[in-house]
């Protein structure tokens, strides 16, 4: 069912500062109810990095210097469109973080330095097969910070995030691809129900 014929471009930005990562709780639209970086569609004629800066400002109220961290390609069975997401990291920001109609920003604790160091030089496959949950370690931040931030909520994020977000946090570049295939379920009455997996 490959290849696709057209690509739609999206962006995603993760601000990482003071032992924490800023995520947004998506209040509406695609991915509603999930935590994610800030981002959206790249408009016609726009460069991905400019789109990422625009969305960061629109959704979180801040500006930042972005570093390209990685890219993801999502393919769906029988779909002519593929989705490419350019992912950026910012180690600082300017302005005041503000909630928008679309996103409610919230800080989460990073994994400890030793966990981040253990990620360096490893492949996403090593990481996804690891029994070590690459979640956060509250002991890695000060007592005051630990009381106000939770570990990264992977169970409330897109399924594939736990594979590559640790790489972004460990400052290791990544390229990923996920293929979504249709699941055909035969109903009792002989009709077919088709879902994406
Ligand atoms: P709007 O439709 O709100 O932009 N996005 C994904 N992000 C992650 N982490 N994983 C995925 O895997 C994603 N699929 C899409 C890209 C949609 C936003 O959602 C992101 C954009 O930042 C399935 O304008």
Image (cartoon, rainbow, N blue to C red):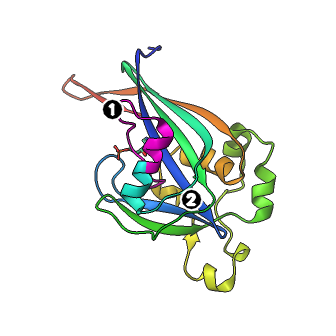
Residue at (58% x, 83% y) in the render = 147
Please tell me which residue lies in front, 125 or 68.
Answer: 68
Residue at (25% x, 29% y) in the render = 187
Query: Which numbered mark, 1 or 2, is in the foreground of this view?
Result: 2
User: Which residue corresponds to mark 2?
Assistant: 15
Please tell me which residue lies in front, 47 or 187.
Answer: 47
Residue at (35% x, 35% y) in the render = 43
Q: Which mark is residue 159?
A: none
Mark 1 vs mark 2, CA separation in Å: 34 Å
User: Which residue corresponds to mark 1?
Assistant: 195
Q: Give the percent coordinates (x, y) of residue 27.
A: 31, 59
Q: Residue furthest left?
A: 189
Q: Earlier in the sequence, mark 1 or mark 2?
A: 2
Q: Give the percent coordinates (x, y) of residue 41.
A: 37, 39
Q: Label 2 neighbourhood size at 10 Å, few (<14), some (14-19), many (20+)?
A: many
Whether residues under marks 1 and 2 lie with C-beta atoms below 8 angstroms apart, the answer is no
In this rendering, position of residue 99 left or right of residue 87: left
Q: Is residue 43 magenta?
A: yes
Q: Secondary structure at mark 1?
A: strand
Q: Is residue 101 magenta?
A: no
Q: Secondary structure at mark 2?
A: strand
> Is residue 98 something one can see in this rendering?
yes
Q: Quadrant of residue 189?
A: top left
Q: Label 1 neighbourhood size at 10 Å, few (<14), some (14-19), many (20+)?
A: few
Q: Give the percent coordinates (x, y) of residue 18.
A: 65, 70
Please tell me which residue lies in front, 130 or 26.
Answer: 26
59 vs 9: above or below = below
Residue at (68% x, 69% y) in the render = 137
Of the 4 image quadrants, the one containing the N terminus is: top left
Of the 4 image quadrants, the one containing the C terminus is: top left
| Stretch of the chain drawn in magenta | 35-53
């Amino acid at each position: 069912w490959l290849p696709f014929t057209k690509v739609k471009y999206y962006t995603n930005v993760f601000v990482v500062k003071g032992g924490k990562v800023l995520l947004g709780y998506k209040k509406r639209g695609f991915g509603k109810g999930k935590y994610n970086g800030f981002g959206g569609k790249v408009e016609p004629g726009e460069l991905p990095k400019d789109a990422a800066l625009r969305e960061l400002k629109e959704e979180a109220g801040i500006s930042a210097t972005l570093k390209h961290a990685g890219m993801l390609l999502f393919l769906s069975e029988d779909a002519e469109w593929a989705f490419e997401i350019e992912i950026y990291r910012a180690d600082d920001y300017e302005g005041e973080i503000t909630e928008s109609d679309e996103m409610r920003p919230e800080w989460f604790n990073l994994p400890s330095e030793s966990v981040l160091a253990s990620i360096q030089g490893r492949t996403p496959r090593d990481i996804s097969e690891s029994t070590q949950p690459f979640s956060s370690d509250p002991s890695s931040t000060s007592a005051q910070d630990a009381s106000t931030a939770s570990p990264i909520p992977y169970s409330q994020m897109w399924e594939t995030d736990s594979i590559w977000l640790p790489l972004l946090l460990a400052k290791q570049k990544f390229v990923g691809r996920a293929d979504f295939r249709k699941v055909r379920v035969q109903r009792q009455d002989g009709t077919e129900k088709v879902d994406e997996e």
